[in-house]
Amino acid sequence: MGVLSRLSYVVRSKINAALNRAEDPSETLDYSYEQMRDELQEVKQGIADLTTQKKRLEMQKRRLEENVEKHNEQAREAVRQDREDLAKRALEKKKTKMNQIEELEGQIASLQNTQDNLVEKKDELQNRIEEFKTKKESMKARYEAAEAQSRVSEAMTGAGDEMADVGRAIERAEERTHDMEARAEAMDELQDTGAFEDALSDKDALDRELEEVRTSGEVDAELETLKTEMGKGSADSGGESDVEAEVETESSGTDEDIEAELEELRDDEGE
């Protein structure tokens, strides 16, 4: 199979698959039923036309038969008047009309046979249409029941196209929700660390830090002033000096003890 043949085969397969998915059996059955009814109507119309044509021939035959009888009377009258020439002409016309009648009878008989065949086929087709109608309704009911059952099963198992779309929509919503939650957490973290500049302030981070230092220094200075006014500044300072002296004394004693222990260790090693 050549490339073009294979490509054509694939295209036809795809088209057939798409048509099968788009085809509704109920609509197909109804369409077939209507087609059969149209055919039946055409058969009935054909029978009606045929019957009309036969009636016309029968009427023409009756007129010819009347002419035959007329020519018979003409021939008798001519014989009574001793006009053989006229009698002969009348008989000739009679013969012509009788030949025409015979030909018409053959046509009428042929039309009658055709009509009988069409009537028989029409009755057969009508019976088939009635049978097809009954089967069609049964098939439509079965298809609708199967379709309903399939929809319920797809809804319960999530295997249908619509349920698949719903599943994908839920996944997308979950992803967007997770992204938004992560973004919110990141914004809170950056806000806590002061990484964001105040949108309503014209100060940057350095200005704010310097301002905090100045504020802290002013608070400390004011505290010292208050302590001095209340007479607690000197006492606190003296207490602090005594504590420092005590700490230095303890540190000196500790250093001497350490030196003594080291000296003893060296003597022991020398021995």
Image (cartoon, grey):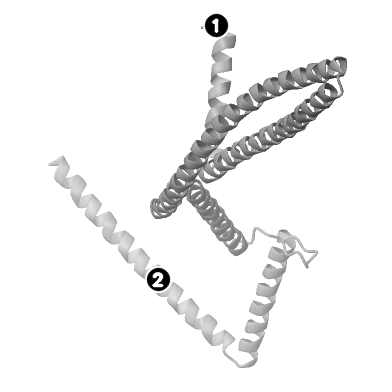
Category of crowding for the residue at label 2, using alpha-carbon neighbours closer than 10 angstroms: few (below 14), some (14–19), many (at least 20): few
SS at badge 2 = helix
* Vertical comparison of 41 with 71: above or below: below
> Which amino acid, by three-letter code, is at mark 2?
Val
Q: Which of 163 and 169 is in front in this view?
A: 163
Residue 126's mark? none
Please state if 149 lies on the left or on the right of 46 as rendered: left
Q: Which of 116 and 191 is in front in this view?
A: 116
Category of crowding for the residue at label 1, using alpha-carbon neighbours closer than 10 angstroms: few (below 14), some (14–19), many (at least 20): few
Q: Position of residue 67 (x, y in %)?
A: 79, 29
For disc 2, the marked residue is 247
> Which amino acid, by three-letter code, is at mark 1?
Gly
Residue at 68%, 69% (x, y): give it.
Answer: 212
Q: Nearer the viewer, residue 26 or 42?
A: 42
| Residue situated furthest left in the rendering | 271
Mark 2 to mark 1 CA distance (whole Å): 103 Å
The picture quadrant where one finds residue 259 is bottom left
| Residue situated furthest bottom in the rendering | 230
Residue at 48%, 39% (x, y): give it.
Answer: 128
- Numbered disc in front, either 2 or 1: 1
* Vertical comparison of 62 with 110: above or below: below
Which quadrant, please, contains the C terminus? top left
SS at badge 1 = loop
For disc 1, the marked residue is 2
